[in-house]
Amino acid sequence: MGSRHHKKPGDVGQVFNLRPIFNRPGERSSPALPGGLCDCVGRRVENPPQVNNLPHTSGSVSLQMLVILVPVIFGFMGFAVDLGRLYLIRGELNQAADAMALAAAQRLVGATASNALVAAALPPNGPPYTYNFGALTLGSSAIAPLCFDTVTDAVAGTNGTSDCSTAAAVQVTVSAGAPLLFWGLLPVAQLRSTPVAAQAVAGMSAPLCTGCGMAPIAVAAPNSSDTADFGFDASKSTVYTLYYACGGAPIPAPLAGTGVRVPYVLIDRYDSASALPEGDQLFQYDALGLTASNDATPNTCTAAPTTPFACVNVGDCEQVWASAASRSCTSAAPSPPVEAALCGLYSRLDSPGNVGICSTVVPDLAALAPAAVPDSDLAPGETPPYSDYLGNGRRLITAAIVGGVGATMTVLGFRQFLIEPNPDGTFFSPSDASGRFPALYAGYPAPLPEGWFDTRFAGAMCPVGSFSGPGKAVLQK
């Protein structure tokens, strides 16, 4: 008989060799086995069946693992929550630092006044800044501003100082403690917070090809070939008599405390789509600067008609305000549009309500005047030089410099002037027949509120990289 393999369920890989009871020749017979016909000798057994006689422990092991893993899982959850909060707070501090740096850079005016203006733009004097979902407020001790004379120094972090008198850029560092929720329970974080800091640098951009928000005034350059100061005093120490351009002789006499006389005109920005009458518009533009409009520009000689209404391009053509054309220099009657514009300039020194003519030429003066706050520095004789100026920037205006005043003019660049009180402490008269007011040439120390330093509007008219002038406040780092 051959070998047979008997396999029971669960007996995998069992091999039994069965030997018949009949002996082969020369082989001793085996003792008879009771109740069996063969001698079933298990010569080799592989993978014998296992008997599971151990106690069941899977439930207790799972419970032990659960006890171990629960705190680990909660630890990871706490780490994720705290880490997410740290990233959020760091982002909030970055935004706060950017906003503070821009606000401070916009207040740099290149004079002693910059120190007070920068301080007024930052907490606790300026607007509050919060973090951690608005639950915490940044205090003044958490904010460290530094001023730099050049943007290059500000980006590199060298030659910083707390004196902003001659600064062109500001670096603001903001630091705060970020609260810890879970990690604050550990011994290594007993303060339950960790310090987080952010830093931003803002300063004057490259000179603007397109300047916006300036006064609608075009001043004739005493020397058009002088690309640095256009013939004005480079030391910023001369007070000029700016008079409205007129024809014939003699030209208007200089005001007290001034010497050189320079003509100016109003550039046309009459907004036919506005509900405000012409006098109101002129007052508002000269008190606060040009504002935006949906109306097309009234400047018909411009080479770039898509230029925004409130902006002026370097190299472009401008034309005089239609109702404010030049008159005879001997005319004794003032021009109402010029009077309305001078009332706007006057509001930078004093309330225009104190001048009777302003209520006549500016129909809605009572409604418009409260927005025009006078300068905080009105001391007579304090300046020149311009660097001694201590005010809030309201007396500083930006005007277009042109090659010569007339019906049409070419803009050479932008420069800034500080409107001055009279030597005796009084102020110029908006009803002056010649439209005169005293102004100190300041160069271009302060940024414009808006504009473009590329040629998107000015095109090839603007010689990018080869001219000087004011920029605007931008983030540098």
Image (tube, grey):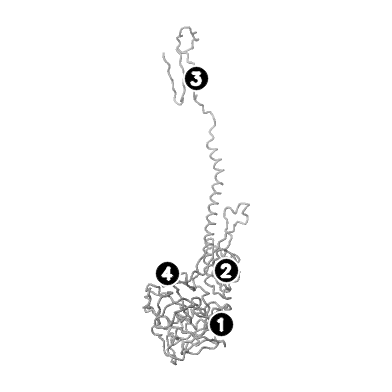
Residue drawn at (56%, 46%), measured in percent from left and top? 72
Comparing marks 2 and 3, which lies closer to the viewer? Answer: 2
- On the image, which quarter does residue 238 sit in? bottom right
- Res 44 label: 3
Comparing marks 4 and 3, which lies closer to the viewer? Answer: 4
Query: Residue 311: in sight, yes or no?
Result: no
Q: Nearer the viewer, residue 179 or 409?
A: 409
Please, what is the three-letter code of the amino acid marked with disc 2?
Phe
CA distance for labels 4 and 3: 96 Å
Element under disc 4:
loop
- Res 455 label: 4
Query: Residue 32: in sight, yes or no?
Result: yes
Crowding at mark 4 (Cα within 10 Å: few <14, some 14-19, many 20+): some
Q: Position of residue 179 (x, y in %)?
A: 57, 58
**Residue positioned most to the front:** 225
- Res 378 label: 1
CA distance for labels 2 and 4: 28 Å
Residue 109 is left or right of residue 307, and the answer is right
CA distance for labels 4 and 1: 39 Å
